[in-house]
Structures are given as structure tokens and as C-alpha cells.
Image (tube, rainbow, N blue to C red):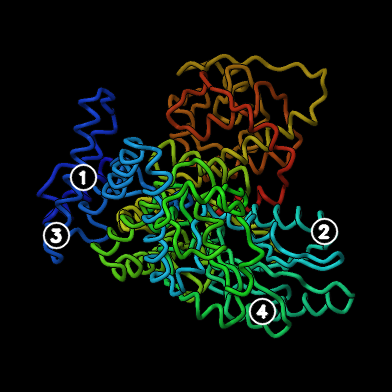
């Protein structure tokens, strides 16, 4: 199917994409890279040619988002469908720019470190200040949001007995760092639960209360018990699910109570336009965001913004030579550090490291300018809105949040009913169709509910509608395999657990095409199919005369379970799971692989060592839900 997809993309889009006919994909050189000096030089020249060609092409003829020509600016292989954004993708022109900066550094490292890098970083901060709507002197460059969060939280004055608040959707580094700081200062952590009800409903607090009201309640309760809030941290756009939070309403509640706010905007730069001065007016004091996720900058580039009244106490996580020592400043060229405030100077130089990811942000912004900033943001946003509705309709499920809480990450519920099946589905998507997308779980909404499983496709300008259609078809094909395989493995694991250790297995050889009545009776007890050369399972369907008339129970199944409808297998497994059991031999892993891989022979089954450890955690409720999904 992936080869058909590639052909469809090339055939259907080439005529609409004039740029696609004017060059050869340079990224194909790196699928099997030539590591000789000449080979690397050729690859570098190809990237340079792509960069120059993009600028020379008239704006109307430049590659548009979602086309072959656009995808060709990224190193993604043609047989890969890539819906992830956690670590970003760097276009060829930006990679080429960083290579040039690295070459400049290595040609004279002393000059680069002490005078060459500083002006470039200040110029990048100027560009980013314009891009985010703030003053340059309030913006610092950091390696990632982890560094930015540590700079803020570990510099914060946290009174003993006070409270730190974050949402349940907070990223792991935020939770860990806040917990560490609270422990160091004798403070308390309060987590405000964010509830996702699905069916396109907005995220809310517990009991359906508006999220801002739930946060206000938490702050008032902390103040009432004598533990005032020292800081509240909110996701600007949460990571998983990737939902836009009501940050203005949240910040206003905090401002009304004198509580400083930090926004974790790791996914914001390049995905959502932002005006930091407007957020500052609502009460936001700190803001962090990665440049590598959505902005097309190299890994190791992010920004930290701090309102001016709080900059005096914020220091980088790693203190460099230029933080306090005036003597060390003599090493820097005067013009390179002239006019910098103390806050800017602390983050200007944090030791010997690679500063080219910071400097290459200029190339990333220039690339976005050539394509069109509005075109990039609107394409990604519209794709997310369309795709989540398309996937939910194709799978007969639901979307997660309304359009106003969706940026460039869509969400649709999967037709999967348990964790084991969801894990297997993710593996099958990669193994069979090279589809890379994040699957995640949401807890039960209400006492009678059960956890649900979702997909979070991220949309960048190299993703097309054909990729979404492939994801939809692949899940429809693979979800039954994942569900049935989990069901069979769980059933066999329970049967083994309740079978007396002294029970002797019945050895059932591979059945011939024609067999005796006695052999047919034995083989019929295996459920009508051989899951292992030496396993016999009581078959209530055969005993009740439910097998079709004229069926030879000894007929071999050369392709595992491929020739038996999966729905029938699921019903039979569910029926036998409630029965008295049998005499199991072989492993649950063998059944799992037999059902999940129609291409494997039932007599040559590979083992999956991690599956058996999951079986004890699965419940009867999960199996019934899985069966209902297949029906």
C-alpha cells in the first residue's frame, strides 16, 4: 500500500507542482550515504543547489505545503509516513546553513567563540523578538525547554510552606522540576486535573467545571490553609494530547490573586502565532518554547522570555564565565557584548558548546518567509481540523476537542479497546506501513467509564491528505488483528493459569488434508485450527454442532488465521474464555503471533517475550469491549 501511496502522490501532484519537475530529490543521496570526502561534498553541493533554487523560483511557482516539491526539502524517506513533531524536522536549506556555520567555527574556533558567534546570536534574538511580539532584551536563547524551565524554577524564591500549581497535562520535566524545587524549599505541589470528555468537548476541570474556575478554586483553597501560591505553571499547548489551553483565562485568574505565571510553550513556536506583550498584560511572567519542534530550527535551540521586573533573579541552569566575573569579559571582543543587560549577558555565553543551532534560527525563519508564514500555519491548522474529523468518521469514533482548541495536532479515538492491543497496533503500523504516529491513553471519564485510546497526528507542510487516508485504511485493517491477538493471548494465559499442573497435554500433530474419524475428533477439540503443533483446546462449537456441514476439521490453515474471518475467531475465543478451559500447551505468545501475523505459519511461531507479562493486567471487561468493536 505504501508503494501505491508513493506512486499516487507523485502522479497526482506532479502536474500541480511545477517545482517538482525542476530538480532531483537531494535527500535520496542520504538513504545510502557515501561517506567519502567526495560523496559528502556532492551532498553538500546538492543541498546548496536546493537552497539557491528555492530563492530563484518566483513566489507563485515555489513548492506549496503538502506537495511533492515541499516534501523534497526534508530528509524523510519516500516510504515513510511521518506524523510526529516532538523533535522536529530540519529542511535542507537550514541544514546547509548550519553546516556553513559549523565550518566557520572550525576554521577559527577562538575567533568564533569570542567574537563571531555573539553578533549572530543577538541578531537571531532580534528576529525572534519581532516574531513573538516582545522586546529583544527580554528574550534569551536556551538549549531547550528543559533548560528554560530549570532556569526559572531553580531561580525562584519559594517560601517554605507555599504552593506550586501545575495542570495534570504538564510535561514530565515540569512536574519533576517543580517537585524538586518544592522539596528543596519545603513547599507543596497541587495538580489541577484536566478532564477530556471527548466528542469535541472543551477540556475542563473535575465535574465539568471550567478549567479557569478549577484553578481559581485550587488557589483559593491553598490561600485558605495558609499556603499561598508562589507560582502557577500552565501548558500553552499541551504535549499529549496536543491541545491549546485557555491560557488567557488562566492567567487572568492568577493575576487577580497576585500569582506569577509560567507558560510551557514548547510546541508553540512555528505552530501558533504569539504576542508575548499581550500575554504579559494578562499576567504571564515567564514563557519558554522550543524552536526545533515546529520552527524548522536544528535540535538544541529554544527561547526563554522573562518579564523585565523578574529578570534579576533568573539565571541559566549552567553558569558561564560571563555571569559575574568582569575579568572574564575582557576575553570577549567589546563590540560583541556591548550594550547587553545583565540578564542578556548571563545567557549570552554558557561555556564551550555548539552555538550553531541558535545562529541557524535565522535560516529557519528565512525558509519560512520564502514559503510564507501564513501559508505554513494555516495549512497545518486546516489539515489538523480536516484530518481528525476524517479519521473519526472512517473509524466510527469521535474527535477529542473543538476546533478552537486545535492548532496543528489532530486527535481521533482509535477503534481499540485495551492497552495491549493499542501497543500492538502502534507496532504494526510501523512494521507494515512505516507509519509513525503517537498513540496515547486517556483515563476513564466517570465511574462507569473505561480508558480510551487515541491517535495524535501532527501536521507539517510535508504531510498530505494521502498520508491521512493511508493512516485511516491501515488502522481499519490492523486494529482487528491487534484486538483479536490480545484477546486470544489473554484467554490462553488465563486457561493456563487455572489448569492443574498435573494435566497432561494432548499431542496433536499437524493434521493431514484427509484424516480418520478419530483424528478428526482430536483435531476438532483444538477449535478447528492449529495454534501449535502440540496444543489441544476444548471446542464447544464443534461439540454443539456449530461447525458448517461438510467442513473437514483437519483441513490445514496454511496462512495462520488469514483464511478464517477475524470476527468469527473473536467470538469463538470469547465463548471459550468463559468455558471450563482445556489442556493448554505452548505459550500465549505463540497464539498472539499466529493471530497478529497472517503471513506466519502456525507451526513456526516466533515468541514475543514482553506480551505474557501484560496478560494478568487485562480484564474480562476489556475482552468484551474488544469483541463488541469487532462486531
Q: Residues within 10 Å of mark 4 (few under 14, many from 20)?
A: many
Q: Nearer the viewer, mark 1 or mark 4?
A: 4
Q: Which x, y percent locates residue 296?
A: 37, 54
Quarter of the figure with residue 534: top right
In this rendering, would 343 be left or right of 90? Answer: right
Is residue 282 positioned above or below 620 on the image? below
Residue 7, labelled with which disc? 1
What residue do we see at 36% from left, 55% from top? 120
Q: Residues within 10 Å of mark 2 (few under 14, many from 20)?
A: some
Q: Which x, y percent locates residue 346?
A: 56, 56
Q: Residue beneath label 4, please?
A: 212
Task: Describe the element under mark 3 as helix, strand or loop.
Answer: loop
Is residue 532 positioned above or below 112 on the image? above
- The one nearer the camera, 127 or 435, is 127
Q: Which x, y percent locates residue 538?
A: 68, 30
Badge 4 or badge 2: first in the primary sequence? 2
Q: Residues within 10 Å of mark 3 (few under 14, many from 20)?
A: some
Q: Nearer the viewer, mark 3 or mark 1?
A: 3
Query: What is the spatial separation of the Cα atoms under label 2 and label 1, in whole angstroms?
Result: 60 Å
Is residue 279 positioned above or below 516 on the image? below
Q: Are marks 4 and 2 in contact (CB under 8 Å)?
A: no
Q: Nearer the viewer, mark 4 or mark 2?
A: 2
Q: Residue beneath label 3, please?
A: 16
Quarter of the figure with residue 64: bottom left
Q: Which x, y percent locates residue 11?
A: 16, 50
Residue 185, labelled with which disc? 2
What residue do we see at 28% from left, 60% from top? 366
What residue do we see at 87% from left, 79% from top? 224
Task: Describe the element under mark 2 as helix, strand or loop.
Answer: helix
Q: Residues within 10 Å of mark 1 (few under 14, many from 20)?
A: few
Residue positioned most to the bottom:
256
Amino acid at each position: 500500500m505504501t508503494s501505491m501511496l508513493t506512486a499516487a502522490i507523485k502522479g497526482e501532484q506532479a502536474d500541480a507542482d511545477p517545482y517538482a519537475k525542476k530538480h532531483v530529490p537531494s535527500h535520496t543521496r542520504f538513504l545510502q550515504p557515501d561517506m567519502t570526502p567526495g560523496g559528502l561534498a556532492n551532498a553538500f553541493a546538492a543541498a546548496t543547489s536546493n537552497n539557491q533554487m528555492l530563492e530563484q523560483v518566483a513566489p507563485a511557482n515555489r513548492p506549496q505545503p503538502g506537495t511533492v516539491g515541499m516534501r523534497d526539502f526534508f530528509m524523510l524517506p519516500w516510504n515513510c509516513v511521518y506524523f510526529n513533531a516532538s523533535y522536529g524536522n530540519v529542511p535542507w536549506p537550514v541544514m546547509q546553513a548550519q553546516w556553513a556555520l559549523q565550518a566557520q567555527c572550525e576554521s577559527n574556533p577562538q575567533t568564533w567563540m569570542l567574537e563571531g558567534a555573539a553578533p549572530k546570536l543577538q541578531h537571531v534574538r532580534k528576529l525572534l523578538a519581532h516574531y513573538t511580539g516582545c522586546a529583544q532584551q527580554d528574550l534569551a536563547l536556551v538549549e531547550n525547554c528543559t533548560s528554560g524551565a530549570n532556569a526559572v524554577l531553580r531561580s525562584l524564591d519559594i517560601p517554605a510552606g507555599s504552593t506550586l500549581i501545575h495542570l495534570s497535562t504538564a510535561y514530565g520535566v515540569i512536574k519533576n522540576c517543580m517537585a524538586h524545587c518544592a522539596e528543596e524549599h519545603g513547599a507543596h505541589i497541587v495538580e489541577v486535573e484536566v478532564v477530556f470528555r471527548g466528542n469535541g468537548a472543551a477540556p475542563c476541570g473535575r465535574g465539568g467545571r471550567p478549567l479557569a474556575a478549577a484553578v481559581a478554586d485550587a488557589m483559593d483553597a491553598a490561600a485558605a490553609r495558609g499556603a499561598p501560591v508562589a507560582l502557577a505553571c500552565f501548558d500553552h499547548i499541551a504535549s499529549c494530547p496536543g491541545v491549546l489551553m485557555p491560557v488567557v483565562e488562566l492567567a487572568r485568574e492568577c493575576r487577580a490573586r497576585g500569582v506569577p505565571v509560567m507558560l510551557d510553550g514548547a510546541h508553540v513556536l512555528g505552530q501558533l502565532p504569539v504576542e508575548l506583550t499581550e500575554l504579559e498584560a494578562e499576567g504571564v511572567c515567564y514563557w519558554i518554547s522550543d524552536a526545533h519542534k515546529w520552527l524548522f530550527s536544528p535540535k538544541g535551540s529554544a527561547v526563554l522570555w522573562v518579564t523585565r521586573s523578574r529578570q534579576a533573579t533568573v539565571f541559566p541552569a549552567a553558569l558561564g564565565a560571563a555571569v559575574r566575573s568582569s575579568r572574564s569579559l575582557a576575553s570577549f571582543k567589546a563590540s560583541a557584548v556591548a550594550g547587553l543587560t545583565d540578564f542578556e549577558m548571563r545567557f549570552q555565553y554558557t561555556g564551550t558548546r555548539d552555538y550553531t543551532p541558535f545562529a541557524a534560527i535565522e535560516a529557519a525563519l528565512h525558509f519560512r518567509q520564502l514559503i510564507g508564514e501564513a501559508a505554513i500555519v494555516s495549512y497545518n491548522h486546516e489539515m489538523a481540523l480536516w484530518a481528525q474529523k476524517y479519521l473519526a468518521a472512517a473509524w466510527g469514533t469521535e474527535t477529542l476537542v473543538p476546533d478552537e482548541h486545535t492548532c496543528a495536532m489532530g486527535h481521533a479515538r482509535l477503534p481499540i479497546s485495551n492497552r495491549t492491543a493499542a501497543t500492538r497496533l502502534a507496532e504494526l503500523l510501523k512494521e507494515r506501513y512505516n507509519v509513525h504516529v503517537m498513540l496515547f491513553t486517556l483515563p476513564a471519564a466517570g465511574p462507569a467509564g473505561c480508558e480510551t485510546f487515541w491517535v495524535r497526528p501532527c501536521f507539517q507542510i510535508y504531510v498530505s491528505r494521502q498520508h491521512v487516508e493511508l493512516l485511516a485504511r491501515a488502522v481499519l485493517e490492523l486494529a482487528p488483528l491487534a484486538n483479536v491477538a490480545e484477546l486470544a493471548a489473554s484467554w490462553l494465559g488465563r486457561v493456563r493459569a487455572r489448569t492443574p499442573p498435573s494435566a497432561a497435554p494432548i499431542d496433536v500433530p499437524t493434521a493431514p488434508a484427509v484424516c480418520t474419524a478419530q483424528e478428526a475428533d482430536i483435531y476438532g477439540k483444538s477449535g478447528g485450527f492449529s495454534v501449535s503443533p502440540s496444543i489441544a483446546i476444548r471446542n464447544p462449537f464443534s461439540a454443539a454442532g456449530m461447525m458448517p456441514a461438510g467442513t473437514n476439521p483437519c483441513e490445514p490453515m496454511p496462512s495462520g488465521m488469514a483464511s478464517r474471518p477475524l470476527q468469527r475467531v473473536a467470538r469463538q475465543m470469547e465463548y471459550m474464555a468463559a468455558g471450563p478451559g482445556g489442556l493448554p500447551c505452548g505459550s500465549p505468545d505463540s497464539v498472539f503471533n499466529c493471530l497478529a501475523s497472517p503471513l506466519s505459519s502456525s507451526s513456526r511461531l516466533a515468541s514475543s517475550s514482553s506480551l505474557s507479562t501484560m496478560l494478568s493486567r487485562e480484564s474480562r471487561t476489556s475482552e468484551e469491549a474488544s469483541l463488541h468493536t469487532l462486531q
